[in-house]
Amino acid sequence: MKQPLVKIEDVYKDYQLPKKYLFQKAPVFRALHGINLELHQGTSFGIVGESGCGKSTLARIVMALDEPTLGKVLFDGRDLFNMPARDLRHLRRNFQMVFQDPYGSLNPRKSILGIVAEPLDTLKEKLSFAEKKKRVGQILAEVGLNAGDTDKFPHEFSGGQRQRIAIARALITRPSLIVADESVSALDVSVQAQVLNLMMDLQEKYNLTYMFISHDLSVVEYITDQVAVIYMGKVVEQGTTKNLFQNPLHPYTQTLLRAVPDVNPLNKKQKNKAIAPLFKKTEKSCPFLDRCTRAAKTCVKGTPKLKLLGEEGHLVACFNAD
Amino acid sequence: MALLQVQDLLITLKTAHGPQEVISHVSFSMDAGEKLGIVGESGCGKSITALALMSLLPPDSRISGKILLEGRNITNLNSREICSIRGNRIGMIFQEPMTALNPVKQIGAQVSESIYLHTKLNRKQTLEQVIELMDKVGLPMERFPLNLYPHQLSGGQRQRVMIAMAIACSPDILIADEPTTALDVTVQEQILDLIQDLADSSGMALVMISHDLGVIAQTAENVMVMYTGNVVEMGSTIDVFQNMLHPYTHGLFSAIPHVGSSAKQSKKRLSSIPGQVPELHLRPNGCNFANRCQRASSICNEKEPSETRISEHHQVWCYHPLNRQDKRKIKK
């Protein structure tokens, strides 16, 4: 098998919380709990989970914006957190990010040329102004904007167009990985479809790899090949998009999928019922214990590990999955 | 008589490009206990419509047409009269619970505010009422004391406080403006269930505003699809969602990825609506959707379409509504 483009090996991330008392040891919040993932060139990997589950922390670590407490991230076989800062900066051209809010992520005082060319400046590419303008123009045309828009400012564009500018900025260094953190969540549905289509076209054209983070399950199902479901910093289910959505095995994934409102008014779906937790959660027990309908005694004593269940590498972390 | 009747509502706001019409000729009516959904993209006027019902429009806006609450026009009332309706007869849940709640006031005090304003209960009775309300919305006193501040609650819990405030005086109409947009799917499900249960048990009419077609499909009996300040299609949710006639409604539906659709397997692209919502001052003379519509003809650019009544419960504003053959073609 080919070497994965990104390999996340047993990554832990702890954040120190503020102390309550002066001489107390600072309490620690564990945002990520031993994450192992592999992203392959030319595919899309979806990360799904509720707010606060660690999705964005993972994105920050893959982008080398934050260092993991433990564990490694290998990009193309090279450890991101064990190399000279200079090399890391050079490597950064290969992975770029598209943020959620197209209004907050573009500097309103900079022209589109300045915004889109900024990665080139940061990477210290010695380009003449004319060359820079030409490259920015090309990339703008590719994301469906006018090549002549380089002198405009962000306020002259709509939300969808701004997100196209953000994509252009990510693409200008010709990266192989794009991390999209809730990149279409802020857009209206008709525009969201345009941006999703654009992202798919670009992927085919440049063999891009996407790490696609979203809380919108139907969007994730639409665009990804592989999905990992994260709950409280742990991967609870992982597999091909097709398997995971058609045959979800972890009770948490099932809860998530059931909670999506159906657009067909005749389909009155079966509802997730709030349950009174049967068992008391301890530090050792399964993180999903208090919300799980299938909890049993075994779940209290130990945390389930990811194990192979079902087809094509479908991994589930649950004692009672069948 | 209908509980709420909106007749030919027209709202003009002052903008940098002069006064602009943001709602034009919107009419609808609601009976007691009815659940109406308003769906549309941002800028289509759904929130402005809700604010108009609450008389919370910005002071420099102009409003014409009528909003009749049990036959009484509430658009021209003075501030004192409107205060007796707002929060009392009509309650509203806002989108962002963090910005709508007062961060320096305890939740109990915020919920009791409208009870103080609108009823003659004394302090003790009010307290009892607040405790009962908090229980109803799933924040029992034992676990959520009334002296908590909003920042001590999660997003879903804050939204529950908002709901308690909105229903404090058992209003006849509850307006929910994107109540779950900022929430996770699992929390969204709980909040929608709660709102529906409360509406069902007390016979409140519900106006559910959302851009999420799924939310509307699951909560509303009747639906109004809006685009750039106009109603483009209206009818029972089943009629409109199953048998849509306006090209815009159809466009919205085809633009959402359905569960079970994977681009990777089918190699298909989502069909998106080309172009974007025209800005206020650039709206065309005729149908506002004409420049994005594939079915547009010359008449669409000249004159605004008028209402076409398909059945008693289904109206559409379009010169070229979809017919059966088109739909079959689309399905293929």
Image: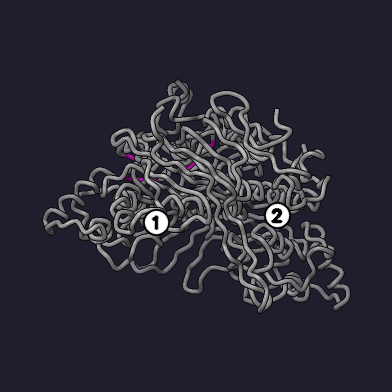
Q: Quadrant of residue A239?
A: top right
**Residue A304 placement: quadrant:** top right
C-alpha gap between disc 1 and disc 2? 41 Å
Residue B211 locus on image (x, y percent): 53, 48
What residue appears at the point 72 percent right and 45 percent down from the top-left corner?
A: A286
The residue beneath circle 2 is B3
Tell me what residue is drawn at x 36 percent, y 41 percent: A76
Q: Is B209 on the left-hand or right-hand side of B133?
A: left
How many C-alpha atoms fall within 10 Å of the one at disc 2: few (<14), some, or many (≥20)?
some
Asked whether A255 falls inside the magenta stretch, the response is no
Judging from the image, mark 1 belongs to the subunit labelled: A
In this view, A79 is above or below A152: above
Q: Circle 2 marks a residue in which chain? A: B
Disc 1 marks which residue? A102
Q: Secondary structure at mark 2?
A: loop
Expressed as whole percent of the image width and height from the top left, the position of residue A144 reads: 28, 44
Above or below, comparing residue A131 to residue B306 in the picture: below
Co-location on one chain, circles 1 and 2: no
Q: What are the residue bounds of the magenta stretch? A: B299-309
Residue shown at 55% from the left, 43% from the top: A48
* Residue at the image point whose x is 29% and y is 58% from the top: A86
The answer to whether one can see residue A43 in this image is yes
Q: What amino acid is at disc 2?
A: Leu
Q: Nearer the viewer, residue A94 or B276?
A: A94
